[in-house]
Amino acid sequence: MKQKIYIETSVISYLCGRLSRNLVVAANQRLTHDWWKTCLQKYDAYVSELVLDEICVGDPAAADKRKKAIKGMIVLPINADVEHIAGEILKRAALPQKVMVDILHISIASLFKMDYLLTWNCAHIANPRWQAKIRLIVGKLGCIMPEICTPQQLYEGEGL
């Protein structure tokens, strides 16, 4: 049985976006392409209604490219349980309201029992200073938070 991976919007943006002039971002975009091509098929891939909403914003041609990239992936709903978990994380961790969308991604991945949450959002989602606190809160709410990682972390572990 394949492990389940929730793919957050930033990964899809890195996959489908124009190559950045920022060398670090460009390297991460390249790595995302490589991971997508060589590793994605090893997982059962999921996105959410939230991801769909986010990738549809902006230039229609770019949005179409992003939508094509996730074609065939299972789309998880945003329901009352997801919203409850997110609200509790925000409140108990004393996080600002402006990060609610990022916390929703963690809540969706936790509620639907993903093994991994794949993201390039290291400020709010793959933030090691927040993860232990959020993991504890999610556990008290009866869920298990997935491993939150970047494509680089999963890609580098593939050869072992």
Image: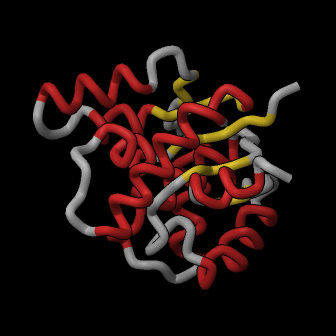
Q: Is residue 120 visible?
A: yes
What residue is at 52 percent from the left and 62 percent from the top?
Answer: 87
68 lies left or right of 85: left
- Colour scheme in use: secondary structure
| Quadrant of the rendered image containing residue 17 | top left
Residue, far top: 72
Whether 137 is drawn above or below 117: the answer is: below
149 lies left or right of 75: right
Q: Is residue 84 visible?
A: no
Q: Position of residue 32 (x, y in %)?
A: 48, 47
Q: How many marks?
A: 0
83 lies left or right of 134: left
Whether 13 is drawn above or below 124: the answer is: above
What residue is at 34 percent from the left and 45 percent from the top?
Answer: 13
Name the one closer to the observer, 108 or 46.
46
Name the one closer to the observer, 43 or 52.
43
Name the one closer to the observer, 11 or 53.
11
Q: Quadrant of the N terminus?
A: top right
Q: Position of residue 38 (x, y in %)?
A: 63, 34
What residue is at 59 percent from the left and 58 percent from the top?
Answer: 152
Whether 105 is drawn above or below 62: the answer is: below
117 lies left or right of 146: left
Q: Position of residue 151 (x, y in %)?
A: 58, 52
